[in-house]
Structure formats: C-alpha cells, structure tokens
Image (cartoon, grey):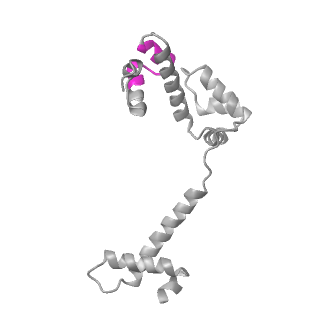
Amino acid sequence: MALKTQLHERDDTLMAIANQLAGCWLPDQNRPSDVQIEAIVTLLLMRLTDRIRDEKREPPRTTAVSPRIKRVLDHIDRDLCATHSLKSLADIAGVSTYHFARMFLAATGRRLHQYVVERRLAHGKRRLKQSDDPIVKIALDCGFASQSHMTEVFTKILGTTPGKMRRNVP
C-alpha cells in the first residue's frame, strides 16, 4: 500500500485499526481516503507516544528526603503562618529557585503551595480534635487568612467544614 510507504509505517495492526476506525467514522463512503487514514494513524501514534511518555515518568520519591529538603520541611512546619516564598525556601536549601522547585516536587510529590496547604489542613484537623479553642483561633494559628478561608479550604479539599469535623459529623 502506498500509504504505508508515505508514513514509513511498518505496523500492520496499526494500519488495520486505522482502516477500521475510518470505516466506522465514515459509514457513507466505501473506502476512506489515504488522507483520512493518515490522519487517524497520526492521531493514534500521538496518543501512543503520550501514553509511553506517561508510563516512563518516575513516581514521586517520598522515602528518601535530602537534608536540604528536610531543612525546608522543618522550617515550614515550625511556622505554618508564614508566607513561604519559593525564593526564601530555596535560600534555606542553598539552591536556585528553579532547582529547588524541581527538588521539592521530586521529594514530596507536591508543589510548594499544595504542600503548605496540606500541612495547614493536617495541623487544623489535629487542633480541632484535640482542643476546645475557637475555630477562628485555630484558623489563624494554622496560617489561614480567616475562619471563612479555612472553612472554604476544608470544604473544597476534605468535603466537610471545620465545625462538622470537630463534631465528628460526616
């Protein structure tokens, strides 16, 4: 088939799939054109390439944390109320902001902001269960701008409000 030569395609199965798909999508025509088949093959190849690239990505490493990242994580936990900028934390780690962002993501599996929000949520949940402090005080102590901000984040991420969590209501 001339189409195979044009595409430099050697996969008979892929060509058969493309022909079948073209036939299904274009039922009112007897035979799909070479251009239509080529378009389908191109889309299939792009999709397969994306899948292979996704499968080759390494999962985030959460077990071995470098001393630099450990210093940063400890710093974040000591002061959840602070605004932790990428630049200030990169300085603590002693690396560039670009390198720090990559290191942090590889070590935690999360971007900096996501990690800080999760730490604030965890601290807030613990305080709600272990103390009788007003929710507004807990929200401010955990680094949220206000009680309503904490409620918004709790609802969005955990699916419940701080008050319901304190009362053990689902």
Q: Is residue 140 visible?
A: no
Left or right: 32 in relation to 48: left
**Is residue 5 part of the magenta span, yes or no?**
no
Residue at image coords 65%, 25%: 74
In the image, farthest residue toward the bottom: 1
Residue at image coords 71%, 37%: 95
**Relative image position of residue 67 (x, y in whole percent):** 73, 32
**Relative image position of residue 84 (x, y in whole percent):** 57, 27
Quarter occupied by residue 102 = top right
**Relative image position of residue 22 (x, y in whole percent):** 36, 77
**Is residue 147 part of the magenta span, yes or no?**
yes
Q: Nearer the viewer, residue 117 or 64?
A: 64
Q: Quadrant of the C terminus?
A: top left
Residue at image coords 52%, 35%: 114
Quarter occupied by residue 61 = top right
**Relative image position of residue 151 (x, y in whole percent):** 39, 24
Left or right: 100 in relation to 48: right
Give the dominant element type of the magenta stretch: helix, strand or loop: helix
Relative vertical location of residue 32 with respect to residue 49 in this rendering, above or below: below
Left or right: 167 in relation to 15: left
Relative vertical location of residue 111 with respect to residue 41 in this rendering, above or below: above
Relative vertical location of residue 7 with respect to residue 157 in this rendering, above or below: below
Q: Is residue 25 visible?
A: yes
Number of residue marks: 0
Q: Which residues lie in the magenta part?
A: 135-151
